[in-house]
């Protein structure tokens, strides 16, 4: 027998949690969160630095603390959730999902909220030459290794990219005992905030090289170093500016992109440039009864914006099913 719910939220990160809580607070009875990982909270679980929650909870919190505030509300409101559960398909109001406990099953929903978040851009996006050697990681992977698993993946590190996540990882790896030899940025200004540059690089004497591009990676089984070069305003390498840096680890922090693959398969319109899900002012997609919020739309500047947007999405979904 197919189970029926009022609202099903795909994704148990901050967007999904906020949408679930607000819809329940609006009087929706049967709300379900589907999360593919083994715990709720998404990437915030590995963000152990303080700096979250000032707008939402009126205090500075770490990522896990921010999540715990949501989970407390979730349990108080008796909102159902399933972990280690992947949604395979959306067809109108029917979701096909799979997990180890029940296998492949189907559920029905009066409304669906997609809150699948985002993914890190891989190495291929910046076309760095070199073979598939060990020691090359995305910033999110390194963050997970250090903060959740207690594993430092390298000793001599070069970070490619200068966004806030990259800057935080430069600081974190230094505190854990690694030598961060340089942060490389192909723009002529840091991608992260001035405050972060001071706190994470200047205070630890970590060099920031602006207007440089990585042109080669050296190594066989594991990376041994990389070659960088100065570039002009058109990203063209300048002659006689190459510099070689020895390292055993390269951390790539070259951006994020919306995780909208499930939405695309369901026929939901996405933005041709960003790939994010397209919604109207009420957070509705082009398919009746399906809403979306959070980084699955576009990459938000911070989690406070995601929370506010997702609260509103939950309210709009509740209003929608009341009018059915």
Image: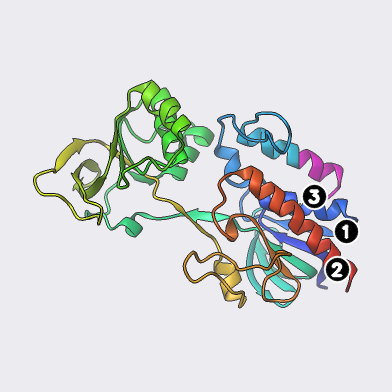
Q: Which residue is mark 1?
A: 28
Q: Is residue 75 magenta?
A: yes
Q: Earlier in the sequence, mark 2 or mark 1?
A: 1
Q: Which residues are magenta?
A: 71-79
Magenta region, main secondary structure: helix
| Residue drawn where x is 39% and y is 21% of the image | 203
In the rendered image, the residue lying farthest to the front is: 233
| Residue 200 located left or right of residue 128 | right
Residue 82 appears in the rendering? no
Location of residue 99 in the rendering, given as x and y in whole percent from the top left corner:
66, 60
Colour treatment of the image? rainbow
Residue 123 appears in the rendering? yes
Q: Quadrant of residue 58 in the image?
A: top right
| Residue drawn where x is 59% and y is 68% of the image | 262
Q: Nearer the viewer, residue 304 or 135?
A: 304
Other-residue count near label 2 (Cα within 10 Å), few / some / many at <14 / 14–19 / ≥20? some
The disc placed on residue 321 is 2
Q: Is residue 234 magenta?
A: no
CA separation in Å, label 3 and label 1: 10 Å
Q: Which residue is mark 3?
A: 21
Q: How many marks?
A: 3
């Amino acid at each position: 027998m197919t189970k029926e719910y009022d609202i099903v939220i795909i994704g148990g990160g901050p967007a999904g949690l906020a949408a679930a809580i607000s819809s329940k607070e609006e009087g929706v009875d049967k709300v379900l969160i589907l999360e593919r990982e083994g715990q709720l909270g998404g990437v915030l679980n590995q963000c152990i630095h303080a700096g979250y929650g000032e707008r939402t909870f009126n205090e500075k919190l770490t990522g896990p603390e921010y999540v715990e505030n949501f989970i407390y509300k979730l349990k108080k409101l008796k909102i159902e959730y399933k972990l280690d559960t992947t949604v395979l398909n959306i067809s109108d109001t029917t979701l096909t999902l799979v997990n180890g406990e029940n296998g492949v099953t189907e559920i029905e929903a009066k409304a669906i909220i997609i809150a699948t978040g985002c993914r890190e851009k891989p190495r291929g996006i910046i076309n760095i030459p070199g073979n598939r050697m060990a020691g090359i990681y995305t910033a999110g992977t390194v963050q997970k290794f250090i903060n959740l698993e207690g594993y430092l993946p390298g000793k001599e590190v070069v970070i490619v990219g200068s966004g806030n996540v990259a800057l935080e990882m430069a600081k974190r790896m230094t505190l854990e005992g690694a030598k961060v030899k340089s942060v490389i940025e192909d723009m002529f200004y840091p991608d992260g905030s001035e405050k972060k540059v001071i706190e994470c690089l200047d205070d630890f004497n970590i060099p920031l090289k602006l207007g440089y591009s990585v042109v080669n990676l050296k190594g066989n089984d594991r990376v041994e170093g990389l070659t960088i070069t100065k570039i002009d305003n058109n990203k063209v390498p300048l002659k006689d500016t190459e510099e070689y840096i020895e390292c055993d680890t390269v951390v790539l922090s070259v951006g994020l992109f919306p995780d909208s693959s499930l939405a695309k398969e369901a026929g939901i319109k996405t933005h041709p440039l960003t790939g994010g899900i397209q919604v109207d002012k009420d957070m509705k997609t082009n398919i009746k009864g399906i809403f979306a919020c959070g980084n699955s739309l576009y990459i938000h500047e911070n989690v406070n914006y995601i929370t506010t947007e997702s609260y509103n999405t939950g309210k709009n979904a509740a209003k929608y099913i009341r009018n059915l």
